[in-house]
């Protein structure tokens, strides 16, 4: 009886593409049925590393199952598509692999392919009947995923063979336009903002028509050959409403601003007529979202170029951007807002200023006692709203008043409104 082969050695041979050595090992062992720690078969390894010859050898010589699933329910086709190995994808499809097989979280090979900027693999899957309208567990279809990656040619191709692909929302109501804006994919946003009627071809359950696929392919090839103008050559359009909102009330413009993508925000303003004062479900506007995420350039853009009131309040909380920045501990954002004229004495609905809110938050987070008698004047000034000059000086980080602390959630830069010598050693030690 032949001794079983070492699975780790076999996997290494597949990864390195050593077909001759692999053939000898398998002949000596009398089988190719070993599985890796995640229940990956040798076919998974071959597809993942783009070893087409080994893939064909394992299927044809050892009759390995091309539909074998690993622990995450991935098939070899998932592996090949996710890594952009077109020759492996085409081989597996030619052998009859199920084109819309699902892995964990309901991802199809087409979805996996859309995470890569590989138009040819997407085309191959579509020509073999892949359904671009299927959704994963989060409610994302392939077009939504492609919008996150930002390849304009893949988006145009999917729209050409399936014009309804753009009409999709995730389970929390986010559209592909939200996603492209959040990730700063300006070319993708340009595609999604086109409103031309576009191609009349419709996707039918069996896959895109060969004529439609070939027509789009010819356009793409022409575009690549002449080196430009893809936005004028491919005129498939979407019809997103200005200021479409997700379930949290966020618009694509808010997404772009809170992530610091000012170029995308400009696009949405120029081509989509986005509303700069739209409010989310808590009544916060774009400037409040930018303050929460510490996007200083976005804050500057909103106030200096778009004329947003730096002290505008969120409808439900009555907080200004300065309150939000202070709560999050964004020192540079606080300084930016102050330089733009923010009122440091502006009060929230409980009659507290940004400085007092910051103090109360620090007291809660650091669990240190209130100021002692020697700090009575400073404490009284803060709680009373204090003169702007005093509070501004406190908000300036110095070695005497500044400290970097690490909490279990994240590392945040915060202001200590008291000298370091006043903090108990045990409190400081617990934060380090």
Image: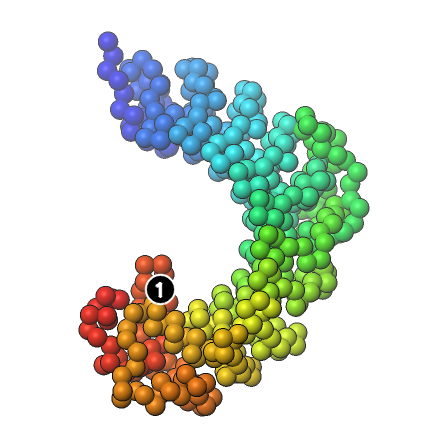
Most extreme residue toward the left, as rendered? 425
Instruction: Write the residue at 31% across / 64% down.
Output: 406
Residue 273: where, in percent of width, then height?
73, 63
Q: Which residue is mark 1?
A: 411
Residue 406's place in the image compared with 378, above or below, is: above
In the structure shown, which secondary structural element does the residue marked by tag 1 occupy?
strand
Instruction: Write the residue at 64% across / 75% down.
Output: 308
Residue 89 visible in image: yes
Residue 148: where, in percent of width, then height?
57, 49
Most extreme residue toward the top, as rendered? 1
Residue 43's place in the image compared with 313, above or below, is: above
Most extreme residue toward the front, as rendered? 350
Residue 17 visible in image: no
The one of 287 and 108 positioned closer to us in this rendering:
287
Q: Residues within 10 Å of mark 1 (few under 14, many from 20)?
A: few
- Quarter residue 384 falls in: bottom left
Display colour scheme: rainbow
């Amino acid at each position: 009886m032949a001794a079983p082969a070492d699975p780790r050695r076999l996997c290494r041979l597949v990864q390195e593409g050593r077909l001759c050595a692999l053939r000898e090992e398998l002949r000596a062992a009398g089988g190719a049925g070993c599985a890796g720690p995640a229940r990956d078969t040798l076919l998974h390894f071959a597809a993942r590393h783009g070893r087409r010859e080994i893939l064909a050898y394992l299927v044809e010589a050892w009759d390995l199952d091309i539909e074998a699933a690993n622990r995450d329910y991935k098939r070899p086709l998932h592996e090949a598509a996710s890594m952009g190995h077109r020759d492996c994808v085409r081989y597996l499809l030619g052998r009859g692999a199920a084109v819309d097989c699902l892995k964990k979280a309901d991802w199809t090979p087409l979805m996996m392919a859309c995470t890569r900027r590989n138009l040819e693999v997407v085309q191959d899957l579509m020509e073999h009947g892949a359904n671009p309208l299927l959704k994963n567990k989060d409610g994302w279809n392939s077009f939504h995923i492609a919008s996150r990656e930002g390849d304009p040619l893949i988006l145009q191709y999917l729209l050409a063979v399936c014009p309804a692909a753009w009409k999709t929302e995730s389970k929390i109501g986010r559209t592909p336009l939200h996603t492209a804006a959040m990730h700063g994919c300006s070319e993708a946003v340009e595609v999604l903002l086109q409103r031309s009627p576009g191609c009349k071809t419709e996707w039918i359950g069996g896959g895109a028509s060969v004529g439609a696929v070939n027509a789009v392919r010819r356009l793409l090839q022409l575009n690549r050959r002449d080196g430009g103008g893809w936005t004028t050559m491919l005129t498939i359009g979407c019809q997103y409403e200005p200021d479409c909102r997700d379930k949290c009330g966020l618009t694509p413009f808010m997404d772009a601003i809170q992530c610091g993508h000012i170029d995308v925000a400009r696009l949405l303003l120029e081509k989509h007529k986005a509303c700069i004062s739209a409010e989310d479900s808590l009544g916060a506007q774009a400037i409040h979202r930018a303050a929460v995420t510490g996007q200083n350039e976005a804050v500057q853009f909103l106030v200096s170029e778009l004329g947003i009131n730096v002290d505008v309040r969120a409808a439900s909380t009555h907080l200004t951007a300065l309150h939000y920045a202070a709560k999050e501990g964004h020192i540079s954002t606080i300084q930016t807002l102050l330089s733009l004229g923010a009122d440091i004495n502006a009060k929230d609905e409980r009659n507290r200023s940004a400085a007092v809110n910051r103090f109360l938050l620090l007291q809660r987070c650091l669990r240190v006692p209130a100021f002692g008698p020697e700090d009575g004047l400073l404490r009284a000034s803060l709680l009373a709203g204090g003169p702007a000059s005093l509070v501004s000086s406190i908000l300036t980080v110095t070695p005497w008043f500044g400290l970097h602390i690490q909490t279990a959630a994240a590392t945040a830069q915060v202001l200590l409104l008291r000298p370091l010598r006043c903090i108990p050693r045990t409190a400081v030690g617990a934060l380090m």
